[in-house]
Image (cartoon, helix red, strand yellow):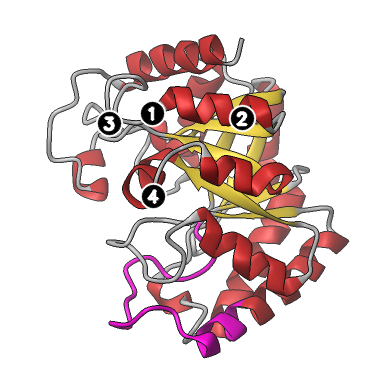
Amino acid sequence: MNIKFGASLLSWITPVWNPEAGKYAIEKTAAAGFDLIEILLPPSMEFNAKEVKQQLKDNQLDVVCSLNLPKEAHIASHPEAAERLIRQAIDKTSELETDFLGGVLHGGIGVFSGHPLTDAEAKIITQVWSHVADYAKERGVNIGIEPINRYETYVCNTAGNVLDLISKTGKDNLYLHLDTFHMNIEENNFYDPVVLAGKKLRHIHMTESHRGMLGEGTVNWDQLFKALKEIDFEGNLVLENFSSSVPGMQQMVSLWQKSPHDAAALAAGSLHFMKSHCQ
């Protein structure tokens, strides 16, 4: 396997980007010993890529980007707004001189139609994905699409949902981005989705069932790592756990139970857990 270990900026700050908080997250990620940070881009795209690139260089840290589509950019109903926003995210990713943009790029989080995804909606989504895939390829960017649970979207809940839509585009720079928190709700197990994806899997959010310390919840990590070794995984394992020690985090991500670990302890313990399981 060829793996880079990363941390989401959400491991350190709330999902509201500002330059001071971003710099703090970069410094904390580097100090904790990770290879890279995943920067969740703000929908406003108010993000000074040149300044951030220098901060990354100063801390000898690699970077990938992600974007979660907001309600007003739900692809099925607002395809033009969604395509425009994804293109802007691709531009920011390219400006940071990295080649990966992941995230919830199939629909706006929290948008529901009251019905399963229709064929007409799927067609709109694959058209937008095809357009942005071509745009990303010109800039050397690969796109990873993250399925999330039924309480946050009706569009893509499983690895199979994403892979099916990707296959309809015929684009070779669209990949699967998994998240073990959502897998724990939607998948039958942690082995089959990884094997199903094979080389289409490039990025995984490593998150415990309760968003806390890896290994202290109900995620079947043995199944996951067995599958990763079988496919000879090449990509990023990115920690995305939350601590109530981060000001404002409880309100932003509905983390109502007090965390037994602060952010630094979560990062250190979870990084050790990931590395020990990859040996």
Query: Closer to the camera: disc 1 or disc 3?
Result: 1
Q: Report x, y in % for residue 160.
A: 54, 59
Residue under pointer 2: 228
Residue 244 in the image: state x and y as whole percent: 21, 31
Query: Is disc 3 surrounded by few (<14), some (14 to 19) or many (20+) residues within 10 Å?
Result: some
* 23 over 68 or under it: above or below: above
Inspect the image, locate mark 3, and give the three-letter code of the amino acid beneath it: Val
Q: Secondary structure at mark 4?
A: loop
Could you give the CA–CA distance between mark 1 and mark 2, rounded to whole angstroms?
13 Å
Horizontally, residue 149 falls left or right of residue 224, namely left
Residue to which mark 3 is pinned: 246
- Spatial CA distance of label 2 from label 4 is 32 Å
The Cα atoms of the two marked residues, 3 and 4, are separated by 13 Å
The residue segment tinted magenta is 104-125
- Nearer the N terminus, badge 1 or badge 2? 1
Residue at the bottom extreme of this rendering: 120
From where the camera sits, is residue 172 visible? yes
Q: Earlier in the sequence, mark 3 or mark 4?
A: 4
What residue did someone put label 1 on?
220
